[in-house]
Image (cartoon, rainbow, N blue to C red):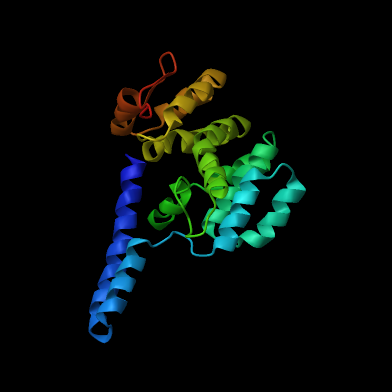
Amino acid sequence: MKRNQATHWIVALILCWTFCAISSAQEWLTPQEKEQQLKKAEELPFDENCGQVAAMANMARAKSLAELKTWKQKAGDSYRAQIVYTFRFFELHPADRNAALSVFSLIPPKKDQEVSYYAFATSLCHDESERDELSLAELGWRIPRDLARAVLVVPEMMFVYVSYAFESVGPESDYAVQMKSVCRADPLDFLKAVSKLSPDDKKWFVTRIFNPAGCHPLALPEQ
């Protein structure tokens, strides 16, 4: 339920695998090399290509489609780069149905992609500037708001939107808070989506995440 915890577990596994790989080959390393390798593992960045990270940050700040596309060519084709491009494109064209659908198409289908979807409020490479880190962090923080806006453009995605709350709510996410605007703007489709949840999921949703009666968010971010 808590995405922040899931992210930490995945990163911990990455570090564990790296450490094990180093340990298995340690007999071939000098003590100094071992220390350097272990230090590198502890500081393992999510993305070592700082040029692409900088391009993604410029996409997050893009003020026009032309600017966005220019930086897209330099940002690479990673899942994270697709997230930045797609969400910023939607922010620049909030009434575009195709853009709204594209936002939902990027909800992580695989567990190993969830880190990329959520890990924006952290340094993505060793030489990332504070400005770039902030730009990407702000885009990450806007994801719940953007999804709330997108589902009002494509209400046929309402069940996907409601279901994704189970994965998105957490101490640093205002997903449930953003659902309030959706519940008020399109109550009929929202209630239909909630009614389609399994009995157990529906019980959890209305008691722990969001109470449709009065459009009241329950899973609030930590202050």
Quadrant in the rendering for residue 169 = top left
Name, please, the residue furthest toward the right.
66
Residue at image point 28% right, 72% down: 35
In the displayed orientation, state which residue is furthest to the top.
214
Is residue 203 left or right of 66 when viewed as pictured?
Answer: left
Let me know if residue 85 appears in the view: no
Answer with left or right where residue 8 lies relative to residue 107. Answer: left
Q: Residue at x 67, y 56 (%)?
A: 72
* Percent x, y of residue 65: 74, 46
In which quadrant will I find the C terminus? top left
Total number of numbered discs in the rendering: 0
Q: Choose between 142 and 201: the one closer to the eye.
A: 142
Q: Residue at x 55, y 48 (%)?
A: 105
Relative to residue 99, is residue 110 depicted above or below?
below
At which x and y percent is residue 185?
57, 20
Residue 58 horizontal/vertical position (percent): 64, 50
Task: From this view, report whether residue 210 is shown above or below residue 123.
Answer: above
Which residue lies most toward the front here?
32
Q: In the image, is 139 to the left or to the right of 11?
A: right
Between residues 66 and 44, which one lies in front from this camera angle?
A: 44
The answer to which image quadrant residue 113 occupies is: bottom left
What x and y, as percent, mark residue 68?
70, 50
Quarter of the picture containing the N terminus is top left
Looking at the picture, tell me which residue is in the foreground, 150 or 59.
59
Is residue 20 in view from this perspective?
yes
Comparing 94 with 34, the one in front is: 34
Q: Residue at x 56, y 33 (%)?
A: 151
Q: Is residue 23 above or below residue 137?
A: below
